[in-house]
């Protein structure tokens, strides 16, 4: 990760690393474009800014003129409507409204409303005699001769509202809708004219500026070509030095990580082994001293109990030492496998019988679909696999539980499984169970404090032995439903791909693991997996 980050930080720019030498003509064209494009952008922006400002100013003037003319027309309508409203002459009102609407091209509609909000005259027949909702405008105008301009739902039309009053008495209201159609059309004409003039000016300026830019670019192209050649040479040198630095950094990082792993493994090894050695040695020493000092005064039952404890702790020490030796041999590639035709069920029966003697409250049924299964294996090592897997189940099974041995023959291999009735294994720990020194009790802060003792080596050794026989091993478990350890072994006559497990060197200088077959000399597997006699 660090090497990749270093490479990312020191990667050369793409425009340099991918660049190719250019001819003088290509360079001149490139420089001309570098001058012309910014100039075009600047001129275009200036034209747009000036155009927007001019159009907005023109729109403002046209709207102001339209508002002024509309107010004059509204005042005329207001004064013309006083007599018809006083006399109730609706026909005259309609004639005036129609005449005004026909004369003024900006007029969208005209409504004359009475005090009761009824439309008395209108240019739109559908509104005549209709009562419009009171929006409060009429009452707002009672205080004076106020003209109100407001927008409508249609963006192209605005409305002017004026009260019709006689001697401070409201007679009605005139609503004049004014269309912005003519204003918008005038603005469109201005925009078209401005675009045409702007394009002509832009093209003329570009033609003049391009001519000048080419003259300048020609003189700069030669100098740039020299600088580019020097840059390419420097780039090649920097890339080569960068590769060398990355390679050295990667090697240093790998060596550092390896040293960290070694130091961590050493610390774990010392911590676990010292703990596992100290406890049984303390028990042996303590009970031995007790027997020495108080042997004659102790009852026979106590003496026998103390001796059993000493024997069990000594056996535990022996198993620990044997596990450590086996792991060391496997890692050094000196773990001998002696293959011979072997019936598997008697091995499982013997392991189950031994475990039953040590754990009389548990049951150990052996269920093989074919009791005569015979494989080309190292019987002692396969027995050790059974012991390690079943012994792991013994630690976690309830007092009256069952550890079940099963075997089922498949097409090219035999599937073995050892099932217990323990508490199960949390899902996050399953993939790590076969790692050296790994124990759920130490890795999980929520695990019970009084957990079964162990070094975390038994499953590691079982995995290595199975793989050295060409098989696979895994575990299936759910919390509260026990665990099922499964492994496969190839049938007799099938090729046995022995897994490489060690890092030691043989006589020829390559790492290897020795496999011996009955009646044949040992075969040592080299680091490439090929057999060496």
Image (cartoon, grey):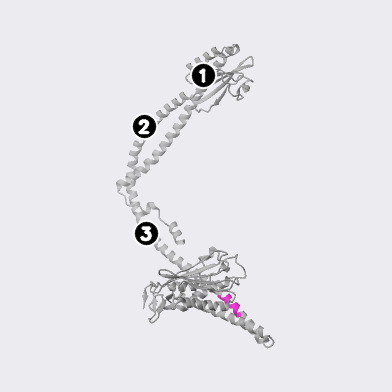
Residue 242 found in image quarter: bottom left
Q: Are the residues flagged by discs 2 and 3 in contact, CB closer than 8 Å?
A: no
Q: Nearer the viewer, residue 176 or 376?
A: 376
- Is the stretch drawn in magenta largely helix, strand or loop? helix
The numbered mark, 1 or 3, whose residue comes first in the sequence reads: 1
Q: Secondary structure at mark 1?
A: helix
Direction from residue 110 to residue 525 in the image, left or right? left
Of labels 2 and 3, earlier in sequence is 2
Q: Is residue 4 in sight in this rendering?
A: yes
Q: Does residue 267 appear anywhere in the picture?
A: no
Q: Look at the numbered disc 3 and give the secondary structure of its residue.
A: helix
Residue segment shown in magenta: 273-281
**Structural distance between the alpha carbons of marks 2 and 3:** 51 Å
- Neighbor class of circle 1 (other Cα within 10 Å; few <14, some 14-19, many 20+) is few
Where residue 123 sits in the image (x, y, percent)? 51, 18
Of circles 2 and 1, the one toward us is 1
SS for dot 2: helix
- Placement of 227 over or under 184, stated as above or below: below
Q: Nearer the viewer, residue 491 or 227?
A: 491
- The location of residue 453, given as percent across then percent down, is 58, 73
| Label 2: few (<14), some (14–19) or many (≥20) C-alpha neighbours in 10 Å | few
Q: Which residue is mark 2?
A: 200
Rendering coords of residue 266 (x, y %): 52, 73
Say whether residue 235 is left or right of residue 441.
left
List the residue tagged with mark 3: 237
Q: CA distance from mark 1 to mark 3?
A: 89 Å
| Discs 2/3, front | 2
Q: Earlier in the sequence, mark 2 or mark 1?
A: 1
- Residue 437: say if magenta: no
Mark 1 — residue?
125
């Amino acid at each position: 990760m660090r090497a990749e980050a270093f490479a990312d930080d020191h990667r050369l720019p793409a425009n340099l690393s991918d660049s190719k030498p250019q001819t003088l003509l290509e360079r001149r064209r490139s420089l001309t474009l570098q001058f012309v494009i910014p100039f075009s952008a600047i001129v275009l922006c200036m034209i747009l800014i000036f155009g927007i400002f001019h159009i907005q100013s023109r729109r403002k003037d046209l709207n102001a003129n339209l508002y002024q003319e509309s107010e004059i027309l509204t005042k005329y309508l207001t004064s013309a409507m006083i007599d018809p409203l006083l006399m109730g002459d609706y026909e005259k009102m309609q004639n005036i409204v129609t005449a005004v609407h026909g004369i003024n091209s900006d007029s969208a509609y005209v409504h004359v409303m009475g005090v009761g909000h009824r439309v008395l005259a209108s240019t739109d027949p559908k509104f005549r005699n209709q009562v419009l909702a009171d929006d409060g405008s009429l009452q707002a105008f009672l205080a004076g001769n106020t003209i109100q301009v407001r927008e409508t739902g249609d963006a192209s039309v605005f409305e002017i509202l004026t009260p019709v009053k006689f001697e401070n008495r409201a007679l009605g209201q005139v609503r004049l809708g004014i269309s912005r159609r003519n204003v918008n059309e005038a603005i469109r004409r201005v925009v078209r004219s401005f675009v045409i003039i702007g394009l002509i000016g832009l093209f003329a300026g570009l033609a003049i500026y391009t001519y000048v830019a080419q003259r300048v670019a020609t003189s700069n192209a030669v100098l740039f070509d020299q600088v580019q050649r020097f840059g390419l040479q420097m780039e090649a040198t920097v890339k080569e030095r960068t590769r060398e630095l990355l390679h050295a950094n990667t090697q240093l990082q790998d060596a550092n990580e390896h040293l960290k792993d070694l130091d961590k493994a050493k610390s774990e090894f010392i911590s676990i082994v010292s703990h596992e050695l100290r406890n049984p040695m303390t028990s042996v020493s303590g009970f031995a001293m007790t027997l020495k000092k108080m042997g004659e005064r102790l009852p026979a039952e106590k003496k026998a109990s103390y001796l059993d404890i000493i024997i069990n702790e000594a056996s535990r020490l022996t198993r620990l030492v044997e596990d450590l030796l086996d792991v060391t041999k496997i890692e050094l590639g000196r773990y001998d496998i002696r293959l011979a035709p072997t019936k598997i069920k008697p091995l499982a029966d013997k392991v189950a019988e031994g475990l039953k003697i040590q754990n009389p409250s548990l049951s150990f049924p052996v269920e093989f679909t074919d009791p005569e299964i015979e494989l080309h294996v190292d019987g002692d090592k396969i027995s050790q696999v059974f012991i390690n897997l079943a012994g792991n189940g013994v630690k976690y099974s309830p007092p009256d539980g069952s550890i079940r041995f099963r075997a089922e023959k498949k097409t090219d291999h035999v599937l073995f499984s050892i099932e217990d009735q323990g508490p199960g294994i949390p899902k996050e720990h399953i993939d790590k169970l076969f790692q050296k020194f790994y124990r759920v009790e130490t890795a999980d802060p929520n695990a019970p404090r009084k957990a079964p003792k162990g070094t975390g080596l038994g499953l590691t050794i079982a995995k290595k032995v199975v793989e050295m026989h060409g098989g696979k091993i895994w575990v299936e478990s759910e919390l509260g439903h026990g665990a099922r350890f499964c492994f496969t072994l190839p049938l007799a006559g099938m090729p046995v791909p022995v897994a490489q497990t060690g890092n030691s060197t043989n006589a020829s200088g390559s790492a290897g693991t020795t496999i011996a077959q009955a009646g044949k000399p040992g075969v040592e597997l080299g680091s490439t997996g090929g057999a060496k006699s």
